[in-house]
Image (tube, coloured by chain):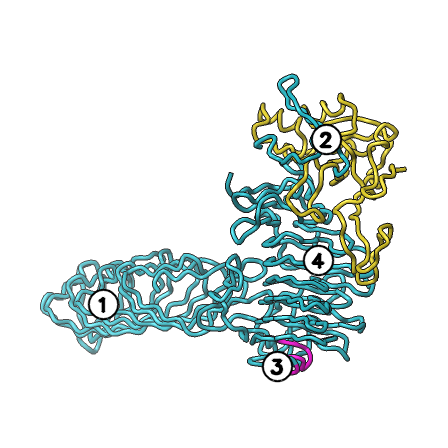
Amino acid sequence: MAVVLFSFKHKGTDQERGHRRGDPIVAMRNNHVWGAGEDKRAHLALYGNTDNWTDATVLIKITGMSVARATALMNRDTRPAGITDPEFNSPDAEDRVVQLARKRWRVRFAEMPLAWRSALNNIGYLEVTIDQIRPYFRHRRTDTQIT
Amino acid sequence: MADQTFQIGTGETYTTIAGWEAASDVSTGFWKGELKDTTAYGGVTIAGVTGTPSISNYVWLSATSGNKHSGKSGTTHARIEAKGAGAVTISDDFTRIDDIEIRLAGSNNSDEAIRITANTNDVLISRCILWTNTTQVDKDGVYTGNWAASYSIDNCIIYGFYRAGLNIQNYSTTSTTQDVNIDYCTIVKCGSSGETESSGINSRTGTGGINNIAVYNTGCFDTASTYDDFGNATESGTTNWSGTNNASSDASLTSRGIATNAQESLTTSDTTQSSGSYAVFQSKTVSSEDYQLLDEAAGNLLIGNAVNRVGSEPDARQDFSLDIVGNTRNTTGPSPDIGASDIFTSGADININATSATHTQTTYNPVISYDVTITPTSAAHTLATFNPSVSYDVGIDATSKALTHTTFNPAVSFDVGITATTVVFTQTTYNPVIDFGADTEIVATSASHTLTTYNPAVSYDLDFTPNSQAQTLTTFNPVVDYTYTFEPNSKTLTQTTYNVIIDYDTEIEATSQALTQTVYNPVVSYDTGIAPDAEGLEYTLVGNRLGYEFNENLTHYGFENNKVHYEFNDEDL
């Protein structure tokens, strides 16, 4: 199963290039030991407080999702230059694309149950199944759920 | 918060490049990540940093000091292996990448080791190895497409990209400008596929597009035969080439109008070339390429043909005094070398004028041979107290570190002519041979033979091999030949009462240890050839935790359990 690092806040001012809240950043296997800059629990254990915690990221362990599957959900959202079909995401031979967003899929924290959001706010970590998170893990533009 | 540096890897604050990048914040200084592990890292996109990048506030990806590459690709240092349209994609201004190997490992077309995206400026790439062994089309080392962008690159080795090492593909028809500064790069076997835009460095401009390419001390070699190492593949706009002291395996520097001090039509090689026109590297062998310079043989025309650019760095963060692995380039005397690596040489003669008694070169271990002429300046012949003036020629072949004269045991031979100037010559312990015969001889009847009234003239050759540092004639047993016919067969000749004039030649052969010259004040002059790879030459003589902005989608917030909670109308989140 995968543990996925998600962006927990909009980053920077570049709407197309910077991570937006809910963007998946990187996925690692369940046994990966995250650092104190990535895992709020590790930060708390190391420093005893959250004074310098950035709240930039949270971790969600998703039972039933492989690292490869999670990584596949991290493609940028693009369309070729001059092509208006928003579903056309494949670059041409020269990768002449317009990047619409840094990530095509993202989770909707605001719609999650309060207990989930509390866990993410307090310790920056949540454990769910793929079926549980599917309704909140959706395409940026079409709003379809992950399969 | 000022500059911030993090190691990236197992057990560190950030265990992934992506996690480090996601937290990047240059509000008060640079945000530096150093790759610590020797396992390959995945690719990264550097974009949307918090804060406004500038020449002093920027994202900086590098390697820990002990994990930098040694000038060739490998698996024991910091490296990124990834595929995609940019193994490393850069979208933040002033992003800096140095001292890492980036391998494009993908199998897709149109991938690059580094992609600099639209309107991203002032990127700096230094001391990196960019390479691939994939054979798909449209592979570039560094790519800038149909958009405005600018970057500087120095001291990089780039090889194996099917289309171009650096593809400045400004094919836009909207009058975009790309500014690229290239210094001390070695680009080999790029553009080898022979596809359109094949080049070591390719410039392409669409109508209205402008490329300003300043390239110095850079070599491009072995592009496909019908394409240029320095190429204008397709151009309907304008490319302004500038620069000097470059090298190529064809004549394209002349074609581009940047042939000043150029070395053109070189043949690449990985064996010593004592003559001819070559670019000689460590290894061209596939899968073990090493495009650092092999040697300084006369046929390697990359040696000494660059121009010193220290002080002319286009980006203030660059340092042109160092090569790809951080070795110091020749910046005085001989010229530096073309390309990413530099073989430092001392070059011309070095003269040392000793101003103190002891001459110590603590960083070299030369083999020394020299001639010594000693002229006595006082009567007493005692080497321990003698104060000669010494001049000698020294040839030094540096093979390792230290030259120390303090513990040397020489073998000495010299001729001595002695003219007695005082009366007494006493041989109190000698037993002569006594002979009675036709001639009257001296008959010695006692052990002691004292010649109290004789003033001998003494002349003899003296050979001795001292076994210790002090050379004192009072303990020496010479063979003496003088007007009286007798031969000593025991004991010691003591010359404590003679004032001698001494003239001798001395040859010293270093057999072990060091020669102590603590009472000498030599003037030293010698020619030095210092071999490559010497380590150095020192001549002592010469959150806000809720810091993000809520927008109109914020529906409500409040406090619960000492924590702040907030809710959004998430139509846009």
How many residues crowd mark 2 within 10 Å: few (<14), some (14–19), many (20+)? some
Where is mark 3, residue-wise? B257
Disc 4/disc 1 C-alpha distance (Å): 105 Å
Where is mark 2, residue-wise? B568
Q: Tell which tag, 4 or 1, sits nearer the viewer.
A: 4
Q: Which of the numbered marks, if any, corresponds to residue A90?
A: none
> In percent of the image, x 76 and y 26: which residue is there?
A126
Where is mark 1, residue-wise? B434
Q: Are marks 2 and 4 on the same chain?
A: yes
Q: Nearer the viewer, residue B418 or B245?
A: B245
Q: Nearer the viewer, residue A49 or B10?
A: A49
Name the chain letter of the residue that bears numbered label 2.
Answer: B
Q: Amino acid at mark 3?
A: Gly
Q: Are marks 4 and 3 on the same chain?
A: yes
| Hue used for the chain lettered B | cyan
Disc 1/disc 2 C-alpha distance (Å): 129 Å
Q: Earlier in the sequence, mark 3 or mark 1?
A: 3
The x and y percentages for residue B332 are 44, 69
- Residue B72, picture quadrant: bottom right
The span picked out in magenta is: B246-255
| Hue used for the chain lettered A | yellow
Q: Amino acid at mark 2?
A: Phe
The x and y percentages for residue B285 are 74, 66
- Residue B509, picture quadrant: bottom left
